[in-house]
Amino acid sequence: MNQLDQLRQYTTVVADTGNFRLLAQFAPRDATTNPSLIVKAVQHSDYAPLLDEVVARYRGKPLEAVADAVLVRFGVEILKVVPGRVSTEVDARLSFDTAATIARAHRLVALYERAGVERERVLVKIAATWEGIQAAKALEHEGIRCNLTLLFSLPQAVACADAGVTLISPFVGRIHDWHKAAAGASWDEAAHAGDNDPGVKSVREIWTYYKHFDIPTGVMAASFRNTGQIAALAGCDLLTISPELLAQLCASDAPLPRRLDVEAARRAPLHAVTYNEPAWRWALNADVMACDKLAEGIRLFAADAERLDAMIEARRP
């Protein structure tokens, strides 16, 4: 078997792309998108007509409503290819507004349902701020499943578990990038590969905590820079992988064994923790990397939302 087939023995494979025409060759169960991927896709000649179609259909509607309709239009097409779920992101500019996040999630789900997609096939992606986690808690109580993204620390993961969210997406590559930049010239790439990769270590810590305490929230590691990071997390609940790295896994038949073991996690000497809002904010504040990457991620996703807005405006009469 190639490495992708080996990986599927232990882990649910998710495609990290807005390019739904690439999906069929890799046969992922689910797909996840973000504003960056959608903006990239709509610039391609194959996908620009979808953007034009939505803009024409929503003529005279508020800009934010048109943008959500574009995201859902791509999600509907993706669900024609994958048998499982698609993640669609709430505008990152709402990351610190619980009520607005809930309202936007309602609109996304309503758009999907009007397109004939049942809500069970949709995951609403929300940034793992305190406000976002509280929004997800309320949405989960309504039966709207959530994927908490831009997750870089155990305190974020614990709060998501306490909120009962369906899925979290800890970012491997961005954690790696931060530590590499912080180390500067002293960084040794080989010494920080595989099991020693700081992003891999972070996901393993979260996954081990969840399995030790039988937390049902799924862990979907994201933001990979190379297949070595993927191999080191074989056995994680889900991995969302770019088409480029999926292709590399398909091209290799090197052994790819399970690396995360549930029984070992249950034997780990861990203590349960919980947070109220002040304690959570203090714990997050203590993690410089998590603070930096959460803030940066929100800024980058917001910038891509603004780019999508500009592309819509350019097409409006």
Image (cartoon, rainbow, N blue to C red):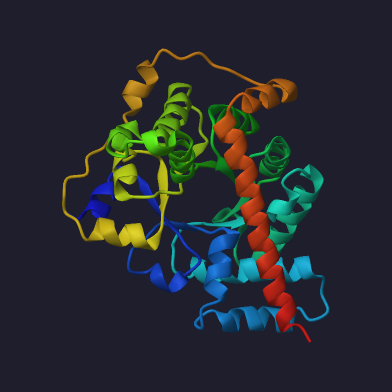
- Residue 75, visible in the rendered structure: no
Residue 247 coordinates in the image, percent (x, y): 30, 62
Which of the 4 quarters of the picture holds residue 190? top left
Q: Quadrant of the C terminus?
A: bottom right
Residue 268, percent from left and from top: 38, 16
Q: How many marks?
A: 0
Q: Which residue lies at the image location 25% right of the left edge and 60% below the top edge?
A: 250
- Left or right: residue 148 compared with residue 55: left
Residue appearing at x 73%, y 53% in the figure: 93
Q: Residue furthest front?
A: 185
Q: Nearer the viewer, residue 259 or 201?
A: 201
Please tell me which residue lies in front, 219 or 96. Answer: 96
Determine whether, in the image, residue 65 is placed left or right of residue 298: right
User: How far across and how far down the image is residue 313, in percent?
Assistant: 75, 77
Give me the residue at 48% from left, 28% from top. 210
Whether residue 300 sits left or right of residue 3 in the image: it is right
Compared to residue 162, the image places residue 115 above or below, namely below
Residue furthest out toward the bottom:
317
Q: Is residue 200 above or below residue 264?
A: below
Q: Residue at x 38, y 59 (%)?
A: 28
Residue 283 vs residue 107, the one in the foreground: 283
Q: Dividing the picture into quarters, in which one does residue 279 lie?
A: top right
Q: Name the quadrant of the N terminus.
A: bottom left
Residue 52 in the image: state x and y as whole percent: 65, 83
Q: Is residue 122 visible?
A: yes
